[in-house]
Amino acid sequence: MPILQETLAGIYAPQRDEIRQMIKEHGDTVVSQVTVKQVYGGMRGVKGLVCDTSVVPPEKGLIIRGIELKELTDKLPEEIFYLLLAGTLPNPEELADLQAQFKKHMQVPAYVWDVLSAMPANSHPMAMFNTAILVMQKESVFARRYNEGMTKDQYWEATLEDALSIVAKLPTIAAWIYRKRFGKGDPIAVNPDLDWAENYVHMLGLGDPDGDFTKLMRLYLVLHSDHEGGNVSAFSAATVNSALSDLYYALSAGLNGLAGPLHGLANQECLKWVIEVNKKFGGSPSKEELEKFSWDTLNSGKVIPGYGHAVLRITDPRFDAFLAFGKQYCAGDPVFDTVAKVFDVVPGVLRQIQKIADPWPNVDAGSGALLYHYGMTEFDYYTVLFSVSRALGITSQAVVARAYGLPITRPKSVPTDWIKAQVNK
Ligand code: HAX
């Protein structure tokens, strides 16, 4: 048995037993209450889900399996995937085992290219990416083994097989979409000697003479990997997977949520906004010009993309990591310079609007400018990159959920008349 599978078998069984025992002994203990505002407010703050891969304390930001993000920025995405699944970072042998498993699964079935080629040429890259994942559903080990009658305690292993197979293929699919959708030439073949992120860079074909773009991509793929369980993409994927729809269905569903402008698409919207600023002012603007432009955006009824968060109440540590990278590698780039200026100005503007709970930048405020610097100028593509990374978290969460034996998700909805009756009691 590969090291990863053997390690996880040793970890998950006692965790599942401990949870079962806790439910048996404390199943009726109250851990959260729900207000009318929360019922109508996207369930914000309601503690009704379990996610052990990561937590996002409002005043700290992302912590993966107990390790703060700032301690993880020099890691490989494969190491983060191992951490998400197993709860510890891999040693060199464990890492090599995982990378070898990825390499076994890298080849994408040829029918995927046929399906993508048949889509309209101006399809959104996210629609193409999520279609590619969905169309591979017939490869699902989980679906096959479920039909063969596997037992419930084997669900996580089959989910893990699907996770490894899908995650290994995502850079190839994402790079193919980049090259075909944006007229960059023929797809570039996988190089099995490269690691997961290096291979992605290689297949994008943008060139990387000094290796800095690869550094950025590794960082990008680490920073976007997971953000606890209640965000739209993670929650949607987990709900679909809880019906025992396999990971091809579930990941595709979750990433369709990531394609929304209030979620993952904000990174493309954000760079658009920054470029618009530079265009209007013929380069990086003054603080006064930027302040006025921000108010104009808000007064026209639009949001300032890349700012605000449903959970965070500080500058997102993922933004901090991108800003530090930009200062080291992209100083003097007019687009990056504007991103840094926006950070100086926009929180002060948003703080003046009482209803905004978080005036600080989120992950999407800076990432696009860095990609732009390295020649990836197609905004519509950015959420695909985010998706390649977020697949690490979504698939890990599914493996853990199946290992815990969590049931189908089914909260209770109520009609407004029922709420009115409670309020008037
Ligand atoms: N610009 C303008 N208005 C904003 C705002 C911003 N950046 N952030 C919040 N608001 C507004 C909301 O639209 C809301 O207005 P209404 O009551 O009129 O609808 C009000 O302030 C209260 O919102 P909130 O409680 O502060 O924030 P929410 O939890 O409702 O929403 C969002 C969180 C991230 C969706 C929100 O801050 C937003 O729209 N930001 C801009 C888009 C963005 O950057 N999204 C990416 C978030 C990170 C992510 O998921 N990446 O994938």
Image: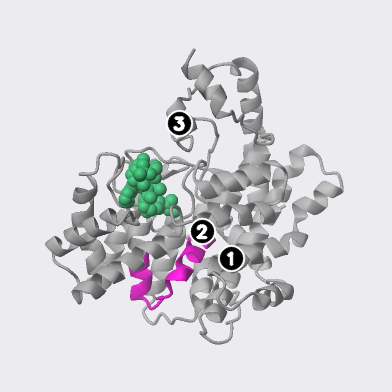
In the picture, measured across the screen, residue 274 lies left or right of residue 408, that is: left
Q: Earlier in the sequence, mark 2 or mark 1?
A: 1
Picture residue at 60% right of the left edge, 80% below the top: 189
Q: Which mark is residue 259?
A: 2
Which residue position holds label 1?
Answer: 127
Marks 2 and 1 in Cβ contact (< 8 Å): yes
Q: Label 1's element?
A: helix
Foreground mark, 2 or 3, reads 3
Q: Is residue 233 above or below residue 9?
A: below
Check if mark 2's residue and mark 3's residue have beta carbons within 8 Å. no
Report the Cα–Cα distance between label 2 and label 1: 8 Å
Mark 2 Cα within 10 Å, few/some/many (few <14, many 20+)? Answer: many
Q: Is residue 363 above or below residue 241?
A: below
**Distance between the alpha carbons at the discs numbered 1 and 3:** 31 Å
Q: Which mark is residue 225?
A: none
Calculate the distance from the C-alpha at mark 2 to the C-alpha at mark 3: 24 Å
Does residue 310 show up? no
Residue range (magenta): 368-389
Q: Kindly identify which residue carries mark 3.
A: 38
Task: Tell me which label, 2 or 3, sits earlier in the chain.
Answer: 3
The total of numbered circles placed on residues is: 3
Q: Quadrant of residue 161?
A: bottom right
Residue that appears at 50% across and 77% down: 204
